[in-house]
Image: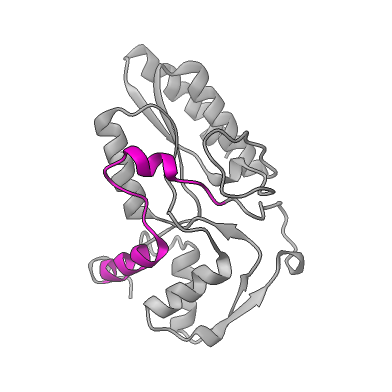
């Protein structure tokens, strides 16, 4: 992971500088410690996990070696993709469809980001060659539990299978930020492709279901 997020980014940044190209680096909300929440681009990163640390190092290499760059930070990325690689939303949906209970955190907050919405924002950033750091997350701050309930409602699944749990009840090998939600006011002000509210994004994901043939 360190080679991918740090060394690979360094070499790409150097190469982009040599050919005078615009480079976009997709980072993460995990560069923040989660103590504050609703982070802006001006807030100082302070990762508490190895993953967050490596992504922040990637950001630093980009700034240090690339001439034209953009750091895009999503949060809790979800949506349809390869069947063998699940994300939070597909994990919730698949388990509820099978009638399985899921334990979901009530005290961890994120800004769920639909992958196709992120892709559209990144495409616009690339086409317009926008530079600087931009939070490209979803426009809603919710707990994981609220996120799961919205998915169940959208996909007409049994909400009663979603059981609340707190972070103290989970023994994680790596620390995770309690509230890594992102403020997307900046992106909302200048991007034509706006960060989506969870209500709209979940409906779009439902419409994408037939195309993806995931359900």
Residue sitting nearer the eye, 8 or 111: 111
Name which residue lies at 33% across and 66% down.
Answer: 205
Relative height, residue 138 to residue 142 (above, below): above
Relative height, residue 4 to residue 86 (above, below): above
Task: Report which quarter residue 116 is drawn in.
Answer: bottom left
The answer to if 207 sits in the magenta stretch is yes
Horizontal relation, residue 48 to residue 41: left or right = right
Relative height, residue 26 to residue 181 (above, below): above
Q: Position of residue 52 (x, y in %)?
A: 61, 41
Q: Position of residue 154 (x, y in %)?
A: 38, 76
Relative height, residue 165 to residue 42 (above, below): below
Q: Position of residue 26 (x, y in %)?
A: 44, 39
Task: Report which quarter residue 128 is drawn in.
Answer: top left
Give the mark count: 0
The answer to if 55 sits in the magenta stretch is no
**Residue segment shown in magenta:** 181-209
Horizontal relation, residue 37 to residue 8: left or right = right
Q: Position of residue 207 (x, y in %)?
A: 26, 69
Where's the N terminus, which quadrant?
A: top right
Residue sitting nearer the eye, 47 or 210: 47
Where's the C terminus, which quadrant?
A: bottom left
Name which residue lies at 32% across and 71% down.
Answer: 214
């Amino acid at each position: 992971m360190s080679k991918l997020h740090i060394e690979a980014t360094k070499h790409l940044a150097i190469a982009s500088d040599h050919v005078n190209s615009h480079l976009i680096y997709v980072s993460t909300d995990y560069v923040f410690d989660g103590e504050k929440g609703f982070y802006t681009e001006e807030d100082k990163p302070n990762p508490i996990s190895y993953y967050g640390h490596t992504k922040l190092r990637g950001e630093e290499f980009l700034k240090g070696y690339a001439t034209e760059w953009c750091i895009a930070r999503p949060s809790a990325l979800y949506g349809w993709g390869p069947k063998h690689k699940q994300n939070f939303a597909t994990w919730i949906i698949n388990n509820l469809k099978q009638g399985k209970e899921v334990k979901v955190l009530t005290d961890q907050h994120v800004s769920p980001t639909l992958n196709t919405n992120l892709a559209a924002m990144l495409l616009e950033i690339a086409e317009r060659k926008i530079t600087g750091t931009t939070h490209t997350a979803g426009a809603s701050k919710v707990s994981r539990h609220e996120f799961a309930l919205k998915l169940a409602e959208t996909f007409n699944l049994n909400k009663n299978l979603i059981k609340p749990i707190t972070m103290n009840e989970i023994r994680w090998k790596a620390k995770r930020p309690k509230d890594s939600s992102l403020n997307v006011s900046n992106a909302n002000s200048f991007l034509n492709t706006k960060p989506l509210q969870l209500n709209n994004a979940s409906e779009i994901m439902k419409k994408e279901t037939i195309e993806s043939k995931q359900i």
